[in-house]
Image (tube, helix red, strand yellow):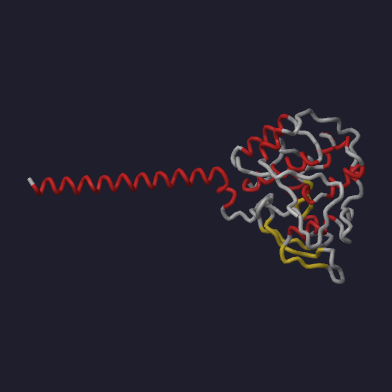
Amino acid sequence: MSITWSAYKRARRRSRQAWAIIALVAATVVAGLAWYFTTGQFNAADPWVAGPSEAPVFNQGWMKPLRGAAPVAAENASEALERIPVKGRAAKTDYDRAAFGQAWADADRNGCDTRNDILRRDLAAVVFTEGSSCKVAGGTFHEPYTGAEVTFQRGQDTSSAVQIDHVVALADAWQKGAQQLTAQQRQTFANDPLNLIAADGPANVKKGAGDAATWLPGNKNFRCHYVARQISVKAAYKLWVTQAEKDAMKGVLASCPGQQTIYNAR
């Protein structure tokens, strides 16, 4: 009888240990899922995570703040979205790129045009053309829209492989409030580093003037940052969104409820 009782106690002890292990594993899984569905899926091995902005915005080493650029509050992107007005698109018939000023002007007056400033900001191992400290001749980067490693090489047949994308397209902005901006504000908008990202040429061409309702980056790891950046730009320049656009943005942000606005941390 004593042997049976001893065996019973050992079995009970093992059972309690087994349940304790199961509980620990379950807690670990729950914690892991919570991490994954908030920030983990976007942070794990994600090269864009770097403080308040998961992709570059401003480098004070050679870039200067643009006068007239509206400030962006550091806050939850979903909350910022709720304050953006929802309206229909205005007519596009009178849209003209010239309404946003000279393309790639030296808006910050640092001696370099905006396209080269953004290439220098976004690329690694940057090489300049001979005799220039502005004109980028080559470099590499982890392209955000596709997630691929891309090499940029300046040349008649190669430069277009990497384009500078307006996160909020100029034509989209024109239909959603930019017509009410001053000419100077529109030029600032078109050259604001917050609204510019070096991107894969074909992906940028496919995007066109699309908003979040019609186009999102193929690289799903970048979508939260991308949508938060669009929200930040539209909030800064007092533009609006359509209902379809807002619904698409909310759908993306539902997978990353902790996503913050993107702002120039200077």
Q: Is residue 215 above or below residue 53?
A: above
Q: Quadrant of the N terminus?
A: top left
Q: Is residue 229 above or below residue 248?
A: below
Q: Quadrant of residue 252?
A: top right
Q: Nearer the viewer, residue 152 or 119?
A: 119
Residue 151 pos. (x, y %): 72, 61
Q: How many marks?
A: 0
Residue 260 pos. (x, y %): 66, 44
Residue 193 pos. (x, y %): 79, 51
Residue lying at the far left of the rendered structure: 1
The residue sitting at 75% across, 29% down in the picture is 86
- Would residue 257 appear left or right of 241 to someone viewing this image? left
Q: Quadrant of the C terminus?
A: bottom right
The residue sitting at 72% across, 29% down in the picture is 243
Q: Quadrant of residue 135?
A: bottom right
Would residue 96 be visible to someone looking at this image?
Answer: yes
Residue 179 pos. (x, y %): 88, 36
The residue sitting at 72% across, 66% down in the picture is 125
The residue sitting at 89% across, 50% down in the picture is 103
Would residue 200 be visible to someone looking at this image?
Answer: no
